[in-house]
Amino acid sequence: MPPPRMPGKALRQRLAELRGPAVPPKALDARALAALAANPGCERRALLDGAGVDKAKLADALGSPSAFGQSQFAFMRGNAFEARVKADGGAELLRLVHEKLDPGAEPPTAGVVPDLSAVGPEGRAARTALALREATAAGVWTLLDHPMLALDVAGSPAFLEPDAVVVHPDGSWTVVEIKSFPMLDGSADPAKVGAAARQSAVYVLALEEVAAHLAQGGDPAPEVRHRVLLVCPKDFSNLPTASAVDIRKQRAVTRRQLARLTRVEDIADTLPEGTCFGPDLPAADLTTAVESVPAAYAPECLAACELAFHCRDRSRAEGVVTALGRSLRSELGGLTTIGEVLAAAHGAAGDPDDPAVAALRRAATLRSEALRGRATPPTGRPELRSEDLPEVAPCR
C-alpha cells in the first residue's frame, strides 16, 4: 500500500505559516469533512481546515465563540457505550453485523482483531491498509478497531478514524458507526441518523481509495458495502442494538461536493503576504486575515462551523442574501444583496423581464394591497379593538 499523497514541502511550510509559529495542526475528522462537503463554496473553511487551523480557538480570539460541541458527560457516556459494544473481542459487534448485513454468511465464532498501532497517522494508515489486505485474503470475520484512513481533500490528505471496519468472510468491507443517542422501538432521531450517514459516507469514500490501491497489484478490488451499520443504545438501556443504513445517496453527494472544492494551494496563493491565523494575534489582525478569504455563510453553518457567528455578523452587516438561506438565494438569481432585492421589488432597479424581479414586484404589489385593506376596514363592519375583547382569568 503506497503512503497517502502528502503536499509538497513548500505547501506544508505555507500552511504552517498560516497556522502560526509552533501551532500544531488540528486533525480534520469525518464530521468536519462532511460539513465542509455540504458547503463546497466556502473557501474560508476549506483553507482553514486544510491548514489545520483550530477554528474554535480562532472564533474565541475574534470575539465570536462557538456555542456548540459535545458535553463532557456525553463524551464519557459515548466512550463507555463503545467499550461495551467492542468488549470480548467485538463478539457482540460482529454478531450485529452478521444479523443485520450478512445473515447468509457463517456466524462469527471468534473474530480476529489485528493490532493497528504504528507511528504517526501516515504509519497507522499504512498499517490499516496492510491489515485490510491480510483480512481480505484470510476470509474470516475480522474487526478493525479504530483504523486510520487517508482521503485526499482539495489536494491535502485528511486522516480519518472510523469507530470500526468489519471484513466479512467473502472479503467485503463494512463501516460501523457507534453513536450514544438511543434507538427507541427500532427508530432513532432522523436528524441524528442523517448526520451519522453523512459521516459514514466519508469513511466509505476513504475505504474505496484503499480498495483501489489494493487492486493496483492485479488483485480484484474488495467490495466496500454501501450499507453501513449504525449501533445505538436500545431504548433507555445501555444494551446495543443496530440498524443497517443505506448511504449511497450521501456517498454520491459527498463525492460530488468534495470534487468541487478549490485546491488549498490555489486559495493560499491569493492571500496577502504575511497572512496568519495564529490565535495569539490581536483581534484586529485576525479579523483582517479571516476577511481576506471569501466565505459562503448560510444558516446551516450554525450547526456545523465554529466560525458561524462571526460569518453571520459579517453577512448581516453586508446584507448578503445567503444569510437568509440557500434556498432563497437560489430563487433570487443575480440579486445577491438585500438592498438589490428591495430596490428590484420597489421598481427602482432590476430588469423587468427577469423572473426573479417580476416575482418580487408582484409580491410587493400584493403586500401593498393587503396593508391598504387592513388600514381601511370594510363599510358596515366595525373595527375590532383590544378593549372590546373579553377578559380572561389568569391561570393558577
Image (tube, rainbow, N blue to C red):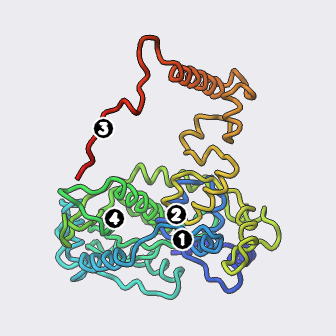
**Is there a contact, CB below 8 Å, between mark 2 and mark 4?**
no
The residue pinned by badge 1 equals: 28
Q: Are marks 4 and 3 in contact (CB under 8 Å)?
A: no
Residue mark closest to the camera, 3 vs 2: 3
Residue 272 visible from this viewpoint: yes
Q: Amino acid at mark 1?
A: Leu
The part of the image, by quadrant, that contains residue 51 is bottom right
Does residue 354 sit above or below 274 in this rendering? Answer: above
Say if mark 2 contacts mark 1, CB within 8 Å.
yes
Does residue 218 sit above or below 84 in this rendering? above
Secondary structure of residue under mark 1: loop
Where residue 15 appears, as percent x and y from the top left, is 70, 74
Q: Earlier in the sequence, mark 4 or mark 1?
A: 1
The type of residue carrying mark 3 is Glu
- Is 147 on the left-hand or right-hand side of 66? left
Q: Is residue 167 in view from this perspective?
A: no
Residue at the spot of label 3: 391
Disc 4 to disc 3, C-alpha distance = 65 Å
Q: Residue at x 56, y 56 (%)?
A: 258
Q: Are marks 3 and 2 in contact (CB under 8 Å)?
A: no
Q: Position of residue 68 (x, y in %)?
A: 47, 67
